[in-house]
Amino acid sequence: MPQGELQAELELLYRAAGRPPYRRVSAEIRRQNHMPDTVSHETVGSILRGDVRVRWSKLESVVRQLAIMAVHRPDQEEEVRRFHALWLAMVDGQQTDQPPAPKPLDEFTDAVAAPPPADGLPPGITPQRNHAFTGRRDLLNQIAGRLAEEPWQPLILHGLAGVGKSQLAVEYLHRNAHRYDIVWWITAEDPSRATAALATLGERREWPASYDMAQTARTVLARLESGAGRWLIVYDNANEPDEIVPLLPQAGGHLIVTTRDAAWLNQGRALEVDVFTRPESIDLLCARGHQIMRDEADQLAARLGDLPLALEQVAAMQSATRTPVADYLQQLDEREAALRLLMSTAPGDYRIPVATAVTVAAERIRRESASTAQLLELISCLGAEPISLTLLRSGSQPIPPPLGRLLELPDALEQAVWRLRRYGLVKVVDDGQALQVHRLVQAIVRDALPADARAQAYTNARRLLSAANPGNPTAPLTWDMYGRIGPHLRPAGMVDATDPSARQVLIDQATYLSEIGDFEGSRRLSRDALDEWTRSGAADDEQALASLQRLAAALKDLGRYGEAYRLADEGWRRLVEHPAYGVHHPTTLKLSDLLAVLDRVFGRYADALRRDRQIVEAYQRIRGDGHTATLQARNNLAVSLRAVGDFRAAHDIDTELTGLRRTAIGPDHQRTLLSVSNLARDLYGLGDYGTSLDLQQSIWPTYQSRLVRRHPHLLAATRTIVQGLRKTGRLAEALDRGRQLYLHCQESLGTEHELTLAAKMSYANSLYANGEVYKASSFASEAVDRYRRTFGDRNPLTLAAATNQAIILRALGERRQARQIGEVSFQALREVVGPDHPYTIAAAVGVANDLVLAREEDIARRRLAGTLEDAKRILGEQHPDTLICAINLGVLMSRGSPDSRALLDRSIDQLRRTLGTGHPLVATAVAGKPAECDIEPPPV
């Protein structure tokens, strides 16, 4: 079959590439600029396992990367052509041999009798099926029935640890997957992992993705709730409902939650999963053990309380050792008495059967191999998530022998994993690339260790994670390893560690989480680390302060600006007075830089400018003019200069930075491209709209190839293009690009983000310029309202948007409302940013237009005359806003002296030279109509 041929060839190429981890393949694809598409590590795994049929661009990316990695170095283009032919043959085969349509969801009459799909699962991430699954027929049918009930509710599978809730959900999923368009498995123990799993689902379905992972998750939930086909999603091992319920779809397909937490029982239809029935226990032991008779199986089952996890472990151990059942029962009796004393448990405690079985197996391991026993102890101090073999190998060096030497030798590690698997203590997952231990088994192994051995196991786990830390968490190439490390930090007690290398792992992990858009995950980890380190008396340690800065940055990214400012300001004030730090210490400067950003968010532009000047001077003193930190500080200074309206000074800095960065790191580096974009914004502020547009468009293809489509820098650059198109008279293009930008910002960043609001206002301005005033009014009103709620009534961004709203209202003939909004905004701008700010000048022109419409022409003339002098002084005589002010004044005075007519004619001629003869503003001026000065604030 064509699909089989394609999969066989992919497997050969994957082997030739050395069977690299899926995360590494994904990271390398992301790093290569020439790749046709990005591919998540989950999608890489699905492609290589043959679980999904993806679009060609994703398969091509995987083929190209594997060809690069292959030892025989095949010709990349030839491989692409070969695989494309195989892919086309597979697609043609699918079109001519369509499978029968799935049954409706209400026809789930017998989940057990339903045959498994013949050609694999629909697109999704699911655990491997347990082919030795036994029993549970009644429960499987009950799951099907409960899922079909009305009204819609999640199904809650609850029960004690070890009763097989997850295995039951896996089996149901595999037996019924052919009935769904989407099946998805989410590990719900941690909200960050659940959020990431939802984001990956969105990527797989090619739904809009956000720079903020939480926003992406919300988009995915909305799609699921609004009819994204037939879907089945399992949230496995869910913790507190307060954290996970917001991450559940609330309508649509079928939803299963597995949990031990009784708080979930009122969150949906509850179905208790209890221990096996005795016949089920006997069937399992006879099927998986070695020559166990049914009466012997009955004795073992009674002895183990019919607990599935204990039964599976005993069956594996007995099969591996060929121990007669009578002897095995004696071993269990001997171990149980000791365990009851050790664990201080009462008779009937459900943990005892598992603990007894696990302890027998662990003792056998210790007799056979000390290093394997230490490996079991180490992985019992990690998370219950899959533990990558790459992670184990990466962190071997600081671990003492014999375990350290075992981890260094791939063959020895594989042998140890085989031994643990043979005795039923671990599962091997991810095509042999990772191992997994049940959390109850982990707890039993830890609890059975003497105190000193347990302490050593935790020490080894922390050393492993510290040594595996790749550093440089802002580089995408390190993200694969951070993804492997993350699930194990809390179980290993890294927050409690005092070793600097262990603490650095937490700081770097929090940075990585922010880089991938998991701002809430970064906040939680930073908060926990800071609280613990403060309690331990290390509040002024540099790593604690780095965690404080990371926490404040995460709060800012989450839009919790007030909390972020208070935290950063408290830390900064403490450092300024601290004898070991002071105002010029790099740690102090980093907090000061964050405060400057927040000052700009709150509209305190003068305060931000003062801070940024001080930061630049400090870095020049301690690092020198050419240091990266100094250049970045100057970049931020230019941002503050633009915010206060000093575009000329910002232009001077950005011109120099662009030249320095082109020389030092190349013209295509992301920082160089950012400097060019800032330069384009400076030129726009200076009124050179054409040059600004040309400059931004000249780097657009390169910028687009360097950044993901949803990156805020790319979206901000797109907005500069939209503004330039409108200001140069290319109105239809501006309208089209402006609409696309607004929709994309809303999908990528959410409705409250500064860039989304700015894009919405830019789109409203384009609608107004194209004559769609009613629609423009609606968008402007919404933008102003959201600005007010997000940033406050007197924030310059709110006031600038309100000034634009007043322009649109005047065009609609809503004179009273326009004047009310315009005058209030003008007066507030005078107070907030000052009378000489370009925003205030633009607002003054609007106020004058309101006065003219109210026939208060004398007051309007005085207002325009004063504003014109301010504009000449601040903006320059050739700036389009200065010329508009002069033209409006000339129109008012044209019936007067010849000098007034001359002013009007000179201003129109200059505007024609600046914007072009056919520009709409020129036509407005020639017709003797007053023009408007809108405001498009640059990013702050």
Image: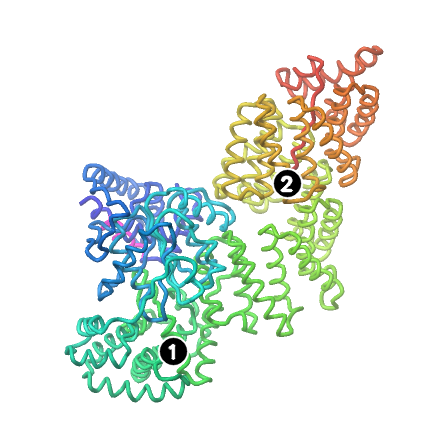
Q: Nearer the viewer, residue 652 or 849?
A: 849
Residue 16 within the segment the image draws in magenta: yes
Majority secondary structure of the magenta segment?
helix
In the visual, does 90 lie left or right of 915? left
Q: Which residue is mark 2?
A: 787
- What is the residue that sits farthest to the front in this orientation? 150
The x and y percentages for residue 738 are: 54, 31
The x and y percentages for residue 522 are: 54, 58
Q: Nearer the viewer, residue 322 or 65?
A: 322
Tell me if residue 371 can be seen.
Answer: no
| In the image, residue 804 above or below residue 331 | above
The tag earlier along the polypeptide, 2 or 1, is: 1
Scheme of image coloration: rainbow
Q: Residue at x 48, y 64 (%)?
A: 469
Real-space Cα separation, disc 2 to disc 1, in angstroms: 55 Å
- Mark 1 crowdedness (10 Å alpha carbons): few <14, some 14-19, many ≥20: many
Name which residue type carries label 1.
Ile
Q: Which residue is mark 1?
A: 444
Q: Residue at x 41, y 47 (%)?
A: 202
Residues in magenta, as a range: 7-18
Q: Secondary structure at mark 2?
A: helix
- The image quarter containing residue 309 is bottom left
The x and y percentages for residue 54 are: 32, 44
| In the image, residue 450 above or below residue 912 | below
